[in-house]
Image (spheres, rainbow, N blue to C red):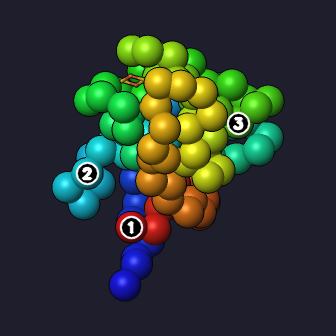
């Protein structure tokens, strides 16, 4: 069963950036795509253990780039778009209520 959990305030994640939060025992990267809203993905790269939230967000392509080896991940599906990563990362449905960012876990 899934439930919506508050992760942060909308003000905690500037537009075009990502921040890492601990949610229910896992690390989640919340990404602010500006007019396109918020996304949430597993904060740990599927290639090696590295933090995706420290990578570059592409607001137009809706991707985040792992800073370690440069794989990009689709923020809507979690799919790895570029090598070396081939395994997707988990994505979490996001809702924004008032100023709160909530995800389904
Ligand atoms: S650790 Fe992310 S691409 Fe290698």
Q: Name the residue under label 1.
A: 105
The residues bearing labels 1 and 2 have C-alpha atoms spaced at a distance of: 10 Å
- In the rendered image, residue 42, in percent from the top left (x then y), is placed at 40, 46
- In the rendered image, residue 19, in percent from the top left (x then y), is placed at 43, 32
Q: Quarter of the image for the C terminus: give it.
A: bottom left
Q: Name the residue under label 2.
A: 26
Q: Is mark 2 on a helix, strand or loop?
A: strand
**Within 8 Å: ligand 1 and the Cβ of disc 1?**
no
**Residue shown at 70% from the left, 36% from the top:** 62
Residue 14 showing in the rendered view: no
**Residue shown at 49% from the left, 47% from the top:** 88
Residues under numbered marks 3 and 1 in contact, where contact means CB atoms less than 8 Å apart:
no
| Nearer the observer, 65 or 71 | 71
Residues under numbered marks 2 and 3 in contact, where contact means CB atoms less than 8 Å apart:
no
Quarter assignment of residue 6: bottom left
| Nearer the observer, 67 or 20 | 67
Residue 5 showing in the rendered view: yes
Q: Is residue 104 left or right of residue 97?
A: left
Q: Mark 3 points at which residue?
A: 62
Q: Residues within 10 Å of mark 3 (few under 14, many from 20)?
A: some
């Amino acid at each position: 069963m899934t439930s919506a959990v508050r992760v942060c305030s909308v003000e905690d994640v500037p537009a075009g950036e990502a921040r890492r939060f601990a949610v229910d025992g896992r690390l989640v990267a919340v990404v602010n795509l500006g007019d396109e809203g918020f996304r949430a993905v597993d904060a740990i790269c599927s290639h090696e253990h590295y933090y995706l939230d420290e990578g570059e967000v592409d607001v137009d392509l809706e991707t985040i780039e792992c800073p370690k080896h440069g794989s990009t991940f689709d923020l809507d599906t979690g799919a790895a778009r570029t090598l070396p990563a081939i395994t997707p990362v988990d994505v979490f449905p996001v809702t924004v209520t008032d100023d709160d960012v909530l995800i389904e876990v």
